[in-house]
Image: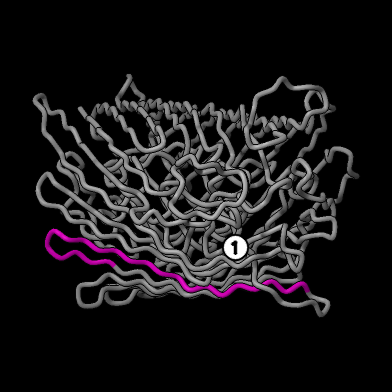
């Protein structure tokens, strides 16, 4: 429903699930660590993994993927100058994070990132977030971690839900969901509609430009309609096939940078539309083999209108006006063939392919340019059970990218990067230890290389691939009633892509010699009576080295530390919770800075609270009423220089289930 309501999901999955709401049957949980549930629905968990079980996630109602920030350790979700909510794991760029829905990558290939605020969680039953490189079968470019959304749900019989909510800034939303069986098919259908007038402006936010005395942040309205339809059926001899249709249609404003006058982005998105059709197959082949395969078609469209001033007056468009239209057509294919060896070991061969074509015009009724990219990966991975508690995973593969269409720029040669993984795990009395090393590449998106972003960037067609070498180690276990997890890592990103400020005042993305990041993550959780507590904290140290004797400087947007504290109390039909979030100092891009284009942002702390009450209704129906206050202290939480997050907001939600 909203960010604070997710505290319940975190705590229900971080600790024993005996306090799960009466209408949600708790899964068979055997061990809980680091906000991780280990059981039949969440196998193969590690200290660097967080899993939310289907029933636990259904116990609350997050609205979109941008509501998941407090639940994923060592991560932050920030809103950039394009108005996109993006996920950064371990301080790494959002382009280093793979996000999938039923195995379909959600990052738009043109820009290699996904706007989480537009990804609805309608129908999502399971969420799994992994930090670092767990397997080479994850999507290419996912060198910092992956977030996997699954619409598959345990069979609980027919169920219908209706949710309504209203909040500050004219925020209004309605969502309906139905799960049931039609013949041989299990079907999930959802539809939702959300509108808002704007985001509340925090008290005392210093915005010299593009903000009047209104209590709403300039140009932050939204209208969005979303829908999802999924059908699944079992196959004779085992396995299943699933079909998915999902999409959204939106219009929204983009908050302008408040520290810039003439150079601020004064944009609106009159059209943001996306539709995805996918199919997947899981099938055992005899007793020793199994096959997984999937295909998807992803169609997307986005229009960006630039304005002369912050009144955003919709005067008639004239030929030559700044008005960017982008149309994307993408095909995804993936497959994996696995051979079981003995009872506990296996060898698998997997491949992924993505073909995308993007057409763009940067002026109204102007010429249209076409860009295309082919991205592919193939890997061989062995999972070997050793003697006793030991387990070994070894993998090798290759990632490749080729752009056969590059607009007005010359076509470049294909880029190829090796992929390697070695991981050793050992179960100890009630805990687990692991050590892993990996290498994987990340290819720049077409927009990173070839787009001027409506006059903000200088294109760099020579931008090359990044290569990450990662070493990580972790432990999880129970100490005196506390479930604890500790993870350390060190990563070096060769030819890391950073934006620099040119003498012209424009930004340009360039390959730095190296970006080095070290970090330590800790998580703890415990339940005492009706009270549940979960904490995670990460300390990071990141620097960008340009090479050739240049000055080493802080890496952009990598905070010194970040974390969250989540507390929930539940007694009978009543529940209440609070959450606190904190982010350390970091350096953010600032085109007004003539030295290095960076400005330091100080440490920030903010928090939310909520209370809920369940009501039983005749006929087996159940109603949940929830009231929340976000950013209770009305803090000015800075996303980037000149971009402030939402202030205090009151939200009321009602959800019924029958």
- Is most of the magenta stretch helix, strand or loop? strand
In this picture, is 604 found above or below 623?
Answer: below
Task: Name the residue at 38% across, 56% down.
Answer: 71
- Residue 107: where, in percent of width, then height? 59, 43
Check the image and name the residue furthest to the bottom.
549
Left or right for 552, reference 526: right
Task: Name the residue at 17% across, 39% down.
Answer: 23
Left or right for 39, reference 366: left
Crowding at mark 1 (Cα within 10 Å: few <14, some 14-19, many 20+):
many
Q: Is residue 530 magenta?
A: yes
> Is residue 102 among the parts visible in the rendering?
no
Q: Quadrant of residue 159?
A: top left
Quarter of the image with the C terminus is top left
Q: Secondary structure at mark 1?
A: loop
Task: Name the residue at 53% across, 26% down.
Answer: 249
In this picture, is 281 found above or below 411?
Answer: above
Which residue in the structure is indicated by mark 1?
557
Q: Magenta residues, as a range?
A: 525-546
In this picture, is 46 found above or below 69?
Answer: below
- Residue 165: where, in percent of width, then height? 32, 33
- Residue 414: where, in percent of width, then height? 81, 51
Q: Is residue 140 magenta?
A: no
Left or right for 396, reference 133: right
- Residue 281: where, in percent of width, then height? 49, 36
């Amino acid at each position: 429903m909203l960010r604070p309501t997710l505290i319940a999901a975190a705590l229900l999955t971080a600790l024993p699930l005996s306090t799960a709401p009466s209408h949600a049957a708790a899964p068979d949980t055997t061990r809980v660590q680091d906000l991780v549930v280990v059981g039949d629905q969440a196998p193969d968990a590690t200290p660097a993994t967080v899993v939310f079980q289907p029933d636990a996630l259904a116990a609350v109602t997050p609205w979109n993927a941008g509501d998941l920030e407090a639940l994923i350790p060592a991560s932050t979700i920030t809103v950039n100058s394009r108005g996109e909510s993006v996920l950064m794991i371990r301080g790494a760029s959002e382009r280093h994070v793979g996000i999938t829905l039923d195995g379909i990558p959600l990052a738009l290939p043109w820009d290699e990132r996904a706007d989480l605020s537009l990804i609805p969680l309608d129908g999502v039953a399971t969420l799994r977030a992994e930090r670092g490189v767990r397997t080479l079968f994850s999507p290419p470019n996912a060198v910092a971690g992956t977030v996997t959304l699954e619409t598959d749900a345990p069979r609980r019989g027919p169920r219908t839900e209706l949710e309504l909510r209203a909040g500050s800034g004219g925020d209004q939303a309605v969502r309906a969901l139905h799960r049931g069986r039609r013949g041989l098919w299990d079907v999930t259908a959802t539809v939702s509609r959300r509108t808002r007038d704007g985001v509340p402006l925090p008290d005392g936010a210093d915005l010299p430009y593009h903000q009047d005395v209104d209590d709403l942040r300039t140009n932050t309205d939204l209208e969005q309609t979303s829908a999802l339809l999924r059908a699944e059926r079992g196959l004779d001899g085992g396995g299943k096939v699933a079909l998915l249709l999902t999409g959204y249609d939106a219009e929204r404003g983009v908050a302008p940078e408040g520290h810039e006058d003439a150079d601020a982005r004064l944009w609106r998105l009159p059209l943001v539309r996306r539709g995805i059709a996918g199919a997947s197959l899981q099938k055992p082949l005899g007793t020793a083999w199994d096959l997984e395969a999937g295909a998807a078609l992803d169609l997307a469209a986005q229009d960006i209108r630039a304005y002369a001033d912050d009144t955003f007056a919709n005067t008639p468009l004239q030929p030559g006006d700044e008005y960017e239209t982008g149309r994307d057509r993408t095909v995804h294919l993936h497959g994996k063939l696995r051979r079981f060896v003995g009872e506990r070991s296996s060898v698998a061969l997997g491949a992924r392919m993505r073909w995308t074509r993007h057409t763009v015009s940067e002026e109204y009724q102007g010429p249209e340019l076409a860009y295309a990219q082919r991205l592919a990966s193939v890997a061989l991975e062995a999972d070997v059970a050793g003697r006793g508690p030991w387990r070994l995973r070894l993998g090798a593969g290759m990632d490749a990218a080729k752009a056969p269409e590059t607009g007005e720029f010359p076509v470049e040669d294909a880029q190829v990067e090796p992929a390697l993984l070695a991981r050793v795990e050992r179960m100890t009395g009630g805990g687990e230890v692991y050590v892993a090393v990996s290498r994987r590449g990340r290819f720049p998106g077409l927009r990173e290389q070839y787009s001027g972003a409506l006059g903000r960037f200088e294109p760099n067609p020579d931008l090359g691939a990044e290569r990450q070498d990662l070493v990580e180690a972790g432990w999880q276990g129970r100490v005196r009633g506390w479930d604890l997890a500790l993870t350390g890592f060190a990563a070096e990103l060769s030819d890391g892509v950073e934006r620099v400020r040119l003498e012209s005042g424009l930004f340009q993305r360039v390959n730095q010699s190296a970006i080095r990041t070290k970090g330590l993550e800790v998580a703890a959780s415990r339940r005492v009576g009706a009270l549940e507590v979960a904490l995670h904290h990460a300390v990071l140290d990141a620097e960008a080295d340009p090479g050739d004797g240049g000055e080493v400087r802080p890496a952009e947007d990598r905070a010194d530390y970040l974390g969250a504290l989540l507390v929930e109390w539940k007694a009978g039909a009543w529940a209440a919770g609070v959450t606190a979030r904190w982010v350390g100092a970091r350096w953010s891009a600032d085109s007004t800075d003539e030295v290095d284009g960076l400005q330091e942002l100080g440490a920030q702390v903010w928090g939310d609270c909520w209370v809920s009450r369940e009501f039983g209704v005749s006929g087996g129906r159940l109603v949940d009423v929830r009231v929340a206050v976000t950013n209770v202290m009305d803090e000015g939480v800075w996303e980037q220089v000149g971009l402030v997050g939402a202030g205090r907001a009151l939200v009321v939600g009602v959800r019924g289930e029958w």
